[in-house]
Amino acid sequence: MLKVINISKSFPGVKALDAVSIEFKKNEIHALLGENGAGKSTLIKVICGIHSPETGELKINGNKIIPKSYRDAIDMSISYVSQELRIIPNKTVAENVMFDKLEKYRKLGFINWPQVNKKAMEYMEEVGLNITPSANVDELTVAQKQLIEIARALALDSKILILDEPTTSISETSIEQLFKILKVFKDKGSTIIYVTHKLEEVFKICDRVSVLRDGKLVGTKPLEEVEKDSLIEMMVGRKLKLTSYGKLNIKDETALEVKNLFRANKAYDINFKLQKGEILGFYGLVGAGRTEAAKLIVGLDSKDKGQIIIDGKEVRIKNLFESLHKHKLGYISENRKEEGLILDKDIRTNICITLWQKLASKILKFINDKQELSISKHWVKALDIKISSLYQKVLNLSGGNQQKVSLAKWLAADCDILIIDEPTVGVDVGAKEAIHQIIFDLADKENKSVIVISSDMNEIIKLSSRILVFRDKKIVGEIEDEL
Ligand SMILES: Nc1ncnc2c1ncn2[C@@H]1O[C@H](COP(=O)(O)OP(=O)(O)OP(=O)(O)O)[C@@H](O)[C@H]1O
Ligand SMILES: [Mg+2]
């Protein structure tokens, strides 16, 4: 169906794709795997006409194609779900879903909106997006935005459907629903290219897998022929050591206490204590209220009732700035695609941004260049962030490496209490291990208190000494680690 032949693509300082050839067949879901920065998104963007390759060619059913823009690719029956959400702000949901097809609904210069809304509804229903088509997208959650992105690609009904990490922020139910749709597409004779870091997904729905490493193709295999371990080895180029951690030495001192935290529709009577040196897990499904609770605690949202007590004293935190600088309480947003980073600034600036206040006011009255450089170097190494220079714009990093920069920024802030929302979405297996180790060490070696919010049960169990289970904006259970 689709052949990519000998494709190479370079960016300043990096060869993102190095003579890659893959054949994608009809009636298959083909997984494209590799570490952060391996070249997956770049390959997809070449196929979609967004990047033009330096060498190589694309063929559909034996015919050479040269898409010069995404518009061109759409005309060749290629559509894609982008890793970065392409939501067009201040527009309706329907307009976003139908964006690539709007012209079809124009007659005598006017777009027939009732018809657009009606059609959009069908695709929204398909992905289980239950909102009015005329709603403004700005009010929506990340999960809803990701579903819009998926619906937008489905609306094109293409023969080649490419999905770049489509499930990073949607719920289990939505993921199941997506898998059903993909199977229908496949059975209709389409080709699906599926990029993910979640290996369970690969084994669940994919037929064959291609692995990229440092821009080169490592190999293509049918999934029956590979095991999880060998797949990981293909990706990282070595055997990955999976660590399990011992028991934390939790102090008998409370770092943070939350009493009767309440906000209508967001949090109902949240009560818990977090000790020094403890890692507390917030487990629940997407939408269970974990993020809402966190935002109320750090002042990103205002509560109706309740108390936040830090080191025994009640505090009133007005915003995240106060939370960080007055109380050394940090919150790493799950919504790193939108909130985490200043994309057109360099890596160094992004990592050190939370430090500026400290460095500037307390020590030197200006930003200490050397210090900044050494701090950013430290975190780039610790998290193995793939960059060509510290002065590179974050915008030009691969999606997973952007995630790592946003984590680094908060780790560099040296908080006493850190709330980390979905610490490892979008990062590769090796980096996931590294991030887990860093979180564990924060509690174990530095006596910090950490709350880990995650929908990944394995991650929560591995890290936490205690787990609070959230459902319907309430804490519905508590699980102690028995180890
Ligand atoms: N527009 C760009 N300008 C400069 N460098 C870029 C650009 N886009 C990608 N790169 C670089 O190309 C390499 C491959 O990036 P790519 O986004 O394809 O990785 P990926 O496999 O999709 O990773 P991830 O899993 O993190 O999404 C990286 O080193 C990245 O920094
Ligand atoms: Mg990518």
Image (cartoon, rainbow, N blue to C red):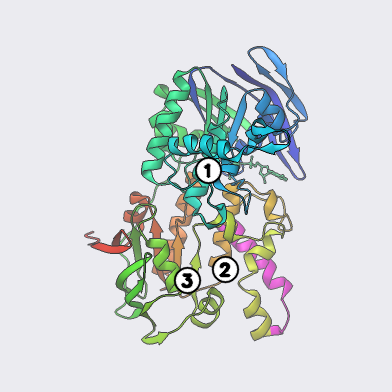
> In this view, which residue lies farthest toward the left?
482
Checking the image for residue 301, the label placed there is 3
> In this view, which residue lies farthest toward the top?
62
> Which stretch appears magenta?
364-383
- Please tell me which residue is depicted at 37% across the width and 50% down the height of the picture: 456
In the image, residue 163 lies in the stretch drawn in magenta: no
> Which residue is identified by label 1?
148
In the image, residue 369 lies in the stretch drawn in magenta: yes
> Which residue is identified by label 2?
412
Res. 293 image quadrant: bottom left
Query: Which image quadrant shows ligand 1?
Result: top right
Q: Position of residue 90 (x, y in %)?
A: 62, 54
- Quadrant in the picture for the C terminus: bottom left
Please tell me whether mark 2 or mark 3 is closer to you in this view.
3
Q: Are marks 3 and 1 in contact (CB under 8 Å)?
A: no
Q: Position of residue 127 (x, y in %)?
A: 44, 38
